Image (cartoon, coloured by chain):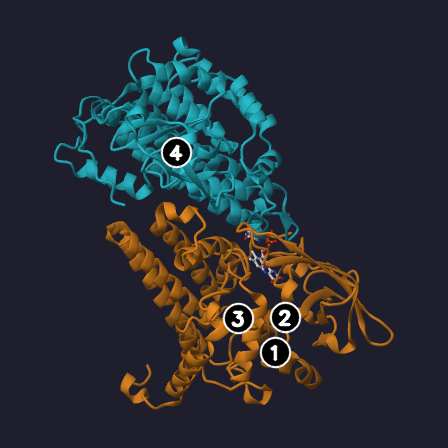
Amino acid sequence: MGAPETALAQNPVDQIRRAIAQWMAEHLTGEFAALRHRGGPGDEGADPALRKRWEREMAAGGWTCVGWPEAYGGRGLSIDAQVAFHEEYARAGGPGRMGHIGEGLIGPTLIRYGSDAQKARFLPGIVEGRTFWAQGYSEPNAGSDLANVQTRCWQCDDGSWRLSGQKIWTSLAHESDWIFVLARSEPGSKGRHGLSFLLLPLDQPGVTIRPIRQISGEAEFNEVFFDEAVAEADGLVGEPGKGWEVAMGLLEIERGVSTLGQQMHFAHELGLVVEVARRNGADRDPAFRARLARAWGGLRVMRYNALRMLSGGDDLKLGREALIYKYHWSNWHRDLGKLAMDALGPEADTPSEDPAVRRLQQVFFFSRADTIYAGSNEIQLNLIAERGLGLPREPRG
Amino acid sequence: MDFTFESHQIAFRDAIRKFLMVEAAPEMLREIWETTSGRSADLRARLADQGLTALSVPEDFGGIGLGDLDWVLVLQELGYYAIPESLVDTAYLAAGLLSELSGDIEIKREWLPRIASGEARVAIGHPSNPFVADAGTANLLLMWHNDAVHAVRPDAVKLTAQPSIDNSRRLSQVEWKPEASTRIADARIGAPLWQRLLLRGGLATAAQQVGLAQRMLDLGVDYAAQRKQFGKIIGTFQGVKHPLADVAVAIEFAEPVVHRAAYCIGRGHARAGHAVAQARMQASEAAHKAARASIQAHGAMGYTWEADLQMFMKRAWVLDAGWGDLAHHKARIAEDIFDDQAALGPSNTFSTHYGEAPAPRVSAVSR
Ligand SMILES: Cc1cc2nc3c(=O)[nH]c(=O)nc-3n(C[C@H](O)[C@H](O)[C@H](O)COP(=O)(O)OP(=O)(O)OC[C@H]3O[C@@H](n4cnc5c(N)ncnc54)[C@H](O)[C@@H]3O)c2cc1C
């Protein structure tokens, strides 16, 4: 199960570790210093313009898309090296990545399903930290039942596409340049058949973006309305009518390497819980200590599981580990949110300037949604029971 | 203890429920939230018309002179409708404390009738809450100082407003100076008064949480009964309906515990603190369960500001930390259980446990 620590001293992983640590020390300074530990989930409102500049700074240093193949502008880092990268990034307080939907979702999807022309056109903007993406899957009547997408698209004589309909809960659409959308291209089709996967720019007359306020008061997600919005002929990924396959491929990627960065943020948050508990004496309560110990254990489990899952290499099919992963982390994180509030006691209820308190309040709010998006708890359990255990499907409509 | 309420208590609760259903719709709560004072004089006047401000005030002072068991049902309704008001602090806690001062004294003559009529708002400053609720609109502040009770006029305090994650609250930090002239009870008289006020604060919290849990459950059930996915009402799926059913069970089990606590306070039981601590634990559990199940049933909709659920979740969450937080109440129960004279085992029936057992040691606030 891997080489002993000492043997790693000069290996490539260690070199990456030291390189990113040094780079962060030199670059997360000056105007960027204000971004330390900012912009994570629940904190998306933290200076998006500056965080976009930070993406370009990262790009200039060659630190975006480090797991992508070199042919597409990445570093082709091994899983181990990516883990090291994420650890050091988080340790240095690296801000939440504005570019994560591009780098983590649509980029890898294009690498797998896109044409050469699409790769040449869209990947550089992501690698260079210039183009920001949103994910247009959910609709008012297509949440858990994603295949019920009703947004229509049709191809014009010149090969370009038109799109009409509505998406909802679209994270960061208001900060994004492009959106990828799942839409119905075959009129009258039902379910997963007859859907197409399209890329289109958000800044055009046919697109209206309306923010939706969240329980925290922030508006991280949006409604996106399409009224004969235009996608170029080149905006179709995969074959017309076969968009479901691409959309599902993307969701598998969502459960992949990008989770490693997330764990590092979780580790930071757990550290903050310990910090406030020390500060206000909650750490002396045995019941609290026991919960904290369990939280720590849960985080380790998450890490081992992710590493085991990723050691399967590119094969990110819905394996056993991938099935259980989302369910585990989202419930763990929701509990951490509650643990954090219990550690804070009365301090939890009043907005604070203290960075630890503020962050934990955001974690509490945001983690209320963790068991809902990216496949709710109930949907995850159905997947585990039906695909994992082979139990018969619950009757659905 | 007989857990049946008297018919007039039920009738009063029903009347209040009907009244709040009309007068305290979620749209109105949202409107009040957005105002600076966070309070509506109009709503207050109508609450007074219903007799709510007079409940705890003795008849001699223009009130109705009812007790904790009458309050508990009303408190559940106030929770259910998340009433943004200083009503509980004024009409239950402050009126309770002032009424329990002995004699026909000036402070009672001046304030109790005004509380009863709904004219006066009274805020309470006690170290178990880091901030004072509704100090900004109070006509009088009852402040703790080394167990003495001080009655302080608004012009003698300096307030710094403190926002809360629950927009229905109006909290302040209060700076004030205890003077001989502000003291209405010294520490010897004050200590037991504060003790009783703390019990009532805890009961009010627990009862409101039970009401809030019911509201969150109702919202979740309503949503699950109309939202469709996969061509079906989502309430059809056991994954959705079972957690909601679990909440219903939690509420049913919390309610008698809360009623028992009200009974113990009303009877002045030595172990009322124990009963309140248990009520707090049980009610908080029901409320958190309800919030979790309801937001889950709502999907992303439950995570929005627009959906009413958030108002009730936030109220339920913040209530946890007031009047002694949960860690304090759990520690209290544990201490009672491990007490040398703890009345455990089959020979200690319900009634002896509460009626005859010696008063427990006062537990230390752990944090
Ligand atoms: C913070 C946040 C960010 C998001 N960002 C994006 C984004 O960027 N892009 C995007 O496309 N979408 C996004 N979403 C939407 C997310 O994908 C959906 O919320 C999710 O798919 C659930 O759909 P829904 O909200 O419509 O809930 P519903 O599908 O209506 O579900 C309601 C409840 O019913 C349950 N349920 C439904 N079907 C079943 C079943 N068969 N068996 C048992 N239980 C069932 C669910 O588990 C849930 O508890 C985001 C959501 C959130 C909360």
Earlier-in-chain disc, 2 versus 1:
1
| Mark linked to residue B206 | 4
Instruction: For mark 1, name the chain.
Output: A
Q: In which quadrant will I find the C terminus of chain B?
A: top left
Q: Chain of mark 4?
A: B
Compared to B20, does A256 lie above or below? below
Give the color of chain B as drawn.
Answer: cyan
| Side (left or right) of B203 relative to A229 | left
- From the image, tell me which residue sits under label 1: A126
Name the foreground residue: B176 vs B24: B176
Q: Is residue B60 left or right of residue A6?
A: right
Q: Is residue B279 above or below residue B291?
A: above
In what element is the residue under mark 1?
helix
**What's the CA distance linking mark 3 and mark 2?**
12 Å
Q: Classify 10 Å Cα crowding around label 2: few (below 14), some (14-19), many (20 and above).
A: many
Q: Quadrant of residue B54?
A: top left
For the point 62% across and 77% down, which residue is it? A130
* Total residue callouts: 4
Residue A60 lies in quadrant:
bottom right
Q: Which residue is rendered at x = 61% and y = 26% of the image?
A: B22
Give the residue type at disc 2. Trp
* Residue A133 - label: 2
